[in-house]
Amino acid sequence: MDDIRSPSRRALLFGHVPAASSPAACRPPWSKSEPEFLAACTRCDACVRACPEQVLLRGADGLPRFEAHAGECTFCGDCVAACGNGAFEPARDPPWTLVAGVADTCLSAQGVVCASCREVCPASAIRVPPGARGAATVDPETCTGCGACVVPCPVDAIALHHAPAMEAVA
């Protein structure tokens, strides 16, 4: 298997770069807190079937999860509308705490001109220094955690993670 820290050109061209996984138990957007979601979700898959982007999948635990390697969440709300069990909080804004993070394997950080993540970001939350003078950076205030940047990254340097809760500044 190719090492993700230094994939060969051949590995890049043929897509043999190991995929990073999404955060554990990454629930659909607008899901209630984990204990409340677990209590309300009946594992009926209505939200999974309703997702037009097909980014909601049934996890090994039988519960729905968001998989950024399947594509981008457009926050259409179809998953929420399909659920008749009260597992979602549709009025909550933002829909979840996911944000993108960039690993040091970013091509731009290695001196290779690349902006594939920036080009697909619908929120314009990603900045890439010109001339490959450093890694891409993500503005956590602007990032929606939609996952659009995950698949296009040729070295899988972008992953979603749950942002820490913001503390109120006194």
Image (cartoon, rainbow, N blue to C red):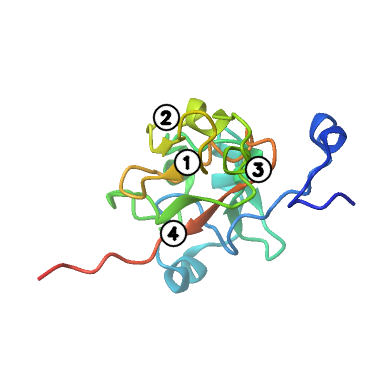
Front of the two marks 2 and 4: 2
Q: Residues within 10 Å of mark 3 (few under 14, many from 20)?
A: some
Spatial CA span between label 1 and label 3: 11 Å
- Compared across the picture, whether 119 is left or right of 48 comes to left
**To which residue does mark 4 refer?**
87
**Residue 132 pos. (x, y %):** 54, 34
Q: What amino acid is labelled 4 in the image? A: Ala
Spatial CA span between label 2 and label 4: 27 Å
Q: What amino acid is labelled 2 in the image? A: Pro
Q: Residues within 10 Å of mark 4 (few under 14, many from 20)?
A: many
Q: Which sits earlier in the primary sequence, circle 2 or circle 3? A: 3
Spot the residue most to the left: 170
Q: What amino acid is labelled 1 in the image? A: Cys
Seen at 59% across and 52% down, the residue is 104
**Residue 55 pos. (x, y %):** 60, 41
Residue 122 is marked as 2
Residue 77 is marked as none
